[in-house]
Amino acid sequence: QVQLVESGGGLVQAGGSLRLSCAASERVFSINIMGWYRQAPGKQRELVATITSGGVTNYADSVKGRFTISRDNAKNTAYLQMDSLKPEDTAVYYCNADVKTRWYSDLSNYWGRGTQVTVSS
């Protein structure tokens, strides 16, 4: 069973930076859209950013100009560079991807377990 494994979360002061990574736990045939979502306490999970296999990106308005999503298709890995962090960015960040595990497989959607990002004021 393929898993998405996130890393890079932690505690940072407002104005600081963090870089999150998301990697597939095993070699897969292809990954279509990869994305980052976040969920703050008492709130619904929300989109942060997505990136297609061709590099087309989409961002939530709240993070535009501060966050950058990228990916390395050869490593089946996505990244989220977060700069100018604010206390309201505090949340558990989840990786999401549409994965084709084998050439004959259908696309399936996967979620990571999440990584905590805490921004202190």
Image (cartoon, grey):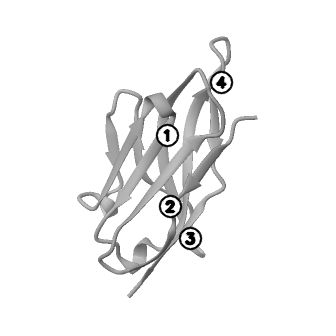
Q: Are the residues at dot 2 and dot 4 in contact (C-beta closer than 8 Å)?
A: no
Pointer 3 local density, CA inside 10 Å: few below 14, some 14–19, many at least 20:
few
29 left or right, relative to 34: right
Image position of 36 with respect to 29: above or below: below
The residue to which callout 4 is attached is 101
Q: Nearer the viewer, residue 1 or 42?
A: 1
Image position of 36 with respect to 110: above or below: below
Q: Residue furthest left?
A: 65
In the rendered structure, which disc, 3 or 1, sits on the residue that comes first in sequence? Answer: 3
Estimate the spatial distance between the alpha carbons at disc 1 and disc 2, rounded to whole Å. Answer: 13 Å
The residue to which callout 2 is attached is 8
Amino acid type for the residue under numbered disc 1 = Thr
Amino acid type for the residue under numbered disc 2 = Gly
* Residue pictured at 61% horizontal, 25% vertical: 28
Between tags 3 and 4, which lies in front?
4
54 left or right, relative to 4: left
Pointer 2 local density, CA inside 10 Å: few below 14, some 14–19, many at least 20:
some
In the rendered structure, which disc, 3 or 4, sits on the residue that comes first in sequence? Answer: 3
Amino acid type for the residue under numbered disc 3 = Lys
- Residue 43: numbered disc: 3
The quadrant the C terminus occupies is bottom left
